[in-house]
Amino acid sequence: MNALLFVGILLFLARLKARRQIRFLLNGPETAGKMRSLFGVGSIPHGDTLDYAFSRLDAEKVQEIVTGIPEVLIRKKVLDPYRLLDKFHTVALDGTGVLVFRSRHCPQCLSKKLHNGETLFYHPVLEAKLVTPNGFAFSLMTEFIENIDPGAAKQDCELKAFYRMAPRLKARFPRLPLCLLGDGLFAAGAVFSICEKNHWAYVITLQDKDLSSIHEEFHALAPLQPENKLIFHTGPQSLIRQAYQWVTDIDYMDASRVPHKVNVLQCRENQATRLQTFKWITNLTLTPSRVPHVANQGGRLRWKIENEGFNDQKNGGYELEHAYSTNPVAMKIFYFLLQIAHALAQLMEKGSLLKAVFPKGLGSRKNVGMRLRDEWVYLPITLDLDAWANASFQIRFDTS
């Protein structure tokens, strides 16, 4: 099983794009020797063998391996320099599509009818990714969005998935100070209540169409709090001008008649000829010294899950939207192995060891995968693996 999981991870690290490529692109003159040295098996497994074996695994146990990677980094304080306000680990929440089928793939498929009358069947996921200003985006926990109850009146969705994920996340990290970053979908009283109950901070995008009463309160109270303004310059040569305004202790009664006290932060950013306005709702205490951090290392950081997270996994050679399996269990295992490979690739690409060997870089992330694949196929093992595994060495990461 170690050999099968290793090859599944290597499939993504080497950016093979399909499991059938294992036999063509990972098989070479040094492959058998490596498999014997590492795992005691005589050859690299076939892609279909991976599919068959993964369909019989417990997906939750593989999820634990994914979660264990950022957990180790947190415990070893590797991620401490990236904490928001020197306290909170920032966790971005967002959903993305993974697989799409023209016909029903399984009973758990979600369905969507297009304007031309065609029905698509698809499998999305909700991700909680630990994101940092320097570009790390580690999968902390995954909740698959799927129709478990065939008699349900409505399909599963991101919010329902978050309500299932939240207790799992709290149980897994009961004392970890988290700040959840979400788009306007999560600007909901039930989400505020969950964060308050779990002692989580949150910075959630407040769109013009959401929570109209809070917008009204913000515009009514802002003139009464003239001290809550700040001009801040950032970016290269401090050419980006940010005008902040915030209102604290806004009373909000949600649809379930549960009261909340929230703060609203607005940022008008002027960059060259472009003017943008951002607004967030948060339970963090807002002061002039904290506001730029809450905005730039909090609210704006949510985009890391889109860019360094989903976009890299879809377009950076991992092929997140490729059907590595059609088995409902195996496809989850392949998804988790992709998350493991993506975490390892980030640590390698941003770490000091790779930069020491390739000070000019390798041109692109896809080239890193190609070099890994070539060395796996052609480079013989000359190391004492036991001695190397027990050796002490240090990896440093860029904090900029």
Image: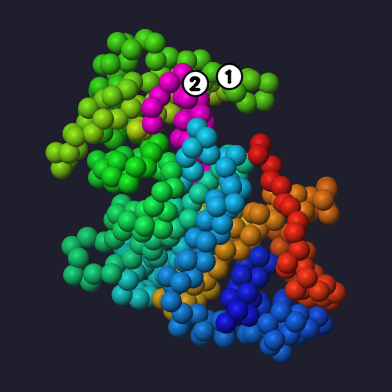
Q: What residue lies at 63% left-to-right and 74% top-to-bottom?
A: 6
Residue 310, horizontal then vertical, whole percent? 52, 53
Label 1 SS: strand
State the residue at coordinates (28%, 69%): 148
Does the magenta segment cover residue 108?
no
- The quarter of the picture where residue 267 lies is top left
Span shown in magenta: 284-305
Residue sitting nearer the eye, 72 or 298: 72
Looking at numbered disc 1 in the image, what kind of residue is underneath it? His
Specify whether 88 is left or right of 317: left
Q: Mark 1 vs mark 2: give the one in front.
A: 2
Q: In this view, does 60 lie to the left or right of 49?
A: left
Q: Which of marks 1 and 2 is nearer the N terminus?
A: 1
Which residue is located at x 51 percent, y 29 percent? 293
Q: Name the residue under label 2.
A: 289
Q: Nearer the viewer, residue 371 or 396?
A: 396
Q: Badge 1 is on which residue?
A: 233
> Which of these two is toward me, 211 or 227?
227
Quadrant in which the C terminus appears: top right
Give the quadrant of residue 233: top right
